[in-house]
Amino acid sequence: MKIGELAKLTACSVQTIRYYEKEGLLRSIKRNEGNFRLYDTRAVKELLFIKHCRSLDISLSEIRQLIDLKNSPETTCNNVNILVDRHNKQVDLRIRELKELKKQLKILRRKCTAGRVVKDCGILLELSQ
């Protein structure tokens, strides 16, 4: 199948597919006489794996590591567990940071009441300091 078909099957843009190829996440693909990329069902599975990882906010470098591990099926999954545990810690940190951000935004929002004009906006005055 050509890249457009792969894009439709996986709901992934052609640009994204090309980017993943460039990043080495999708294996080299065959080309036909017209130099068009040709994909098989393996490419569909690989791309869906990458998309699922991205939906979990797993970074490209982490995905690369998971793909390497996936290609070594006889090794223990300790490294997979370590990677996911590390990613979980990053998510916990982001949650704490977002909670702090929300708190700061609530404080900022209290700096201005309805009915003021922009020149007296407490939010803009606070942000300008």
Image (cartoon, grey):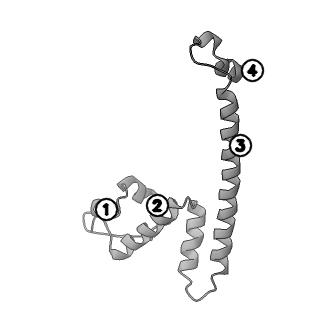
Element type where label 3 sits in the image: helix
Q: State the residue at coordinates (32%, 74%).
A: 40
Label 3: how many residues lie within 10 Å, few (<14), some (14-19) or many (20+)?
few
Foreground pick, 102 / 15:
102
Q: CA distance from mark 1 to mark 2?
A: 12 Å
* Amino acid type shown at disc 1: Ile
Q: State the residue at coordinates (64%, 11%).
A: 120
127 w.r.t. 71: above or below: above
51 w.r.t. 95: above or below: below
Q: Is residue 129 left or right of residue 16?
A: right
The residue tagged 1 is 3
Which is nearer the N-term, disc 3 or disc 2? 2
Q: Are the residues flagged by discs 1 and 2 in contact, CB closer than 8 Å?
A: no
Element type where label 4 sits in the image: loop
Q: CA distance from mark 4 to mark 1?
A: 51 Å
Which is nearer the N-term, disc 3 or disc 1? 1
Q: State the residue at coordinates (62%, 19%).
A: 113
Q: Nearer the viewer, mark 4 or mark 3?
A: 3
The residue tagged 2 is 20
Q: Nearer the viewer, mark 3 or mark 1?
A: 3
The picture places residue 15, in percent across and down from the top left corner, at 39, 53
Q: Quadrant of the N terminus?
A: bottom left
The residue tagged 4 is 129
The residue tagged 3 is 100
Q: CA distance from mark 4 to mark 3?
A: 20 Å
Label 1: how many residues lie within 10 Å, few (<14), some (14-19) or many (20+)?
some
Q: Are the residues flagged by discs 3 and 2 in contact, CB closer than 8 Å?
A: no
Query: Mark on residue 73?
Result: none
Foreground pick, 81 / 106:
106
Q: Quadrant of residue 39?
A: bottom left
Q: CA distance from mark 3 to mark 1?
A: 43 Å
* Amino acid type shown at disc 2: Tyr
